[in-house]
Every structure is written in C-alpha cells, then in structure tokens.
C-alpha cells in the first residue's frame, strides 16, 4: 500500500511538471516565469518522475530490496530539492507557483511516508504468527486426540 501512495504522489508531480512545461495555467502573478527556467528543467522533471513511476510500478508488482533502496534514495533527493525550491520561492523570489508547490510538497510527503510508514512489515509478520499459532493449535488438538486412543481399540477395529 505504501508504494501505491508513493506512486500517486509521483503521478501528481509528473502532471504538475507537464503543466509547468506548457505553462498556460500559471497564476495571475506569473510566478512561474519569475526565475525564467529553461524547458530543460521541465523536461528533466518529466523524465525523472516518469522513471520514478516505472520504478514504483515494478516495486508494486515484484518487490525487491534493491528497488526499495533506489526508491528511498530518489525520494530523499526529491525532498531535499523540494526544500531548496521552497526556500527559493519564499525567501528569494517571494512568490509561489502552485505547480512547483505541488511537486515540492509531494516530495516532502513522500519522505514522511518512507520514514514513518511501518505498517506493511508488521502486518505480514502478524499474519505469519497467526498462521503458525493455528498450525500449533491444530497439531496440539491432533496430539490430544491421539493420546486418548488406545492401541488395542484400533487393533480390535481392524478385525
């Protein structure tokens, strides 16, 4: 479930990067154009978030430890870049772009998810514990029922 939420955040950031590329939806203050970034920056965002979406999709379909590490490192970089860009918008430009904010805040939320979301591992461990306890209960009942059976009764039943 964690990777599905991260996939959703990366998808929202990809859409925001595409909006920034075409830029007709920028707000009245034109804050998107204040720093006059090149189209390369927008294409870079589209490529990076597309790659992240593919990586997250493959992690959802077939999870591996290596993909998890790459995803975590990517999200840390995303969040650090987001913090830097929030700093620039607030203190340097003193103006905000709603699409940039969406990307930056999504990165920070993704960082919080990888740091604090621990539910999946516990749930799988709890399921394994429940399954083992059920098996133990079954074998205990089987042993108890076999202790009550007399061998002579079984031999007489066969005759």
Image (cartoon, rainbow, N blue to C red):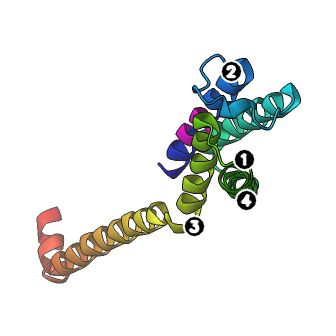
User: Is tag 3's residue or tag 1's residue first in the polypeptide sequence?
Assistant: 1
Residue 159 makes an appearance in the image = no
Q: Is residue 132 left or right of residue 22?
A: left
Q: Which residues are magenta?
A: 8-12
Q: Closer to the N terminus: mark 3 or mark 2?
A: 2
Location of mark 3 (residue):
115
The residue positioned 31% from the left and 73% from the top of the image is 133
Residue 128: give x, y in percent of width and height.
41, 66
Q: Which residue is mark 1?
A: 93
Q: Which residue is mark 2?
A: 23
In what element is the residue under mark 3?
helix
* CA–CA distance in space, label 1 to label 2: 18 Å
Q: Which of 122 and 103 lies nearest the eye of the viewer?
A: 103
Rendered location of residue 67, percent (x, y): 73, 51
Q: CA distance from mark 3 to mark 1?
A: 30 Å
Q: Which label sits in the foreground, 3 or 2? A: 2
Q: Residue at x 66, y 49 (%)?
A: 94
> Which residue is drawn at the image coordinates 82% and 28% (left, top)?
43
Tag 4 near tag 3, CB within 8 Å: no
Task: Give me the C-alpha separation between circle 2 and circle 4.
Answer: 24 Å
Real-space Cα distance between discs 4 and 1?
Answer: 18 Å
């Amino acid at each position: 479930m964690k990777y599905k939420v991260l996939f959703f955040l990366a998808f929202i950031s990809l859409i925001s990067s595409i909006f920034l590329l075409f830029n007709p939806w920028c707000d009245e203050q034109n804050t998107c154009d204040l720093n006059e970034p090149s189209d390369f920056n927008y294409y870079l965002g589209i490529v990076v978030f597309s790659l992240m979406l593919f990586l997250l999709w493959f992690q959802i379909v077939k999870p591996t430890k290596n993909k998890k590490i790459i995803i975590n490192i990517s999200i840390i970089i995303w969040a650090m870049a987001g913090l830097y860009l929030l700093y620039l918008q607030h203190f340097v430009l003193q103006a905000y772009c709603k699409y940039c904010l969406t990307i930056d805040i999504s990165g920070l939320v993704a960082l919080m998810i990888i740091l604090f979301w621990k539910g999946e591992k516990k749930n799988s461990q709890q399921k394994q514990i429940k399954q083992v306890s059920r098996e133990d209960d079954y074998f205990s009942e089987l042993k108890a029922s076999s202790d009550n059976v007399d061998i002579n009764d079984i031999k007489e039943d066969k005759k």
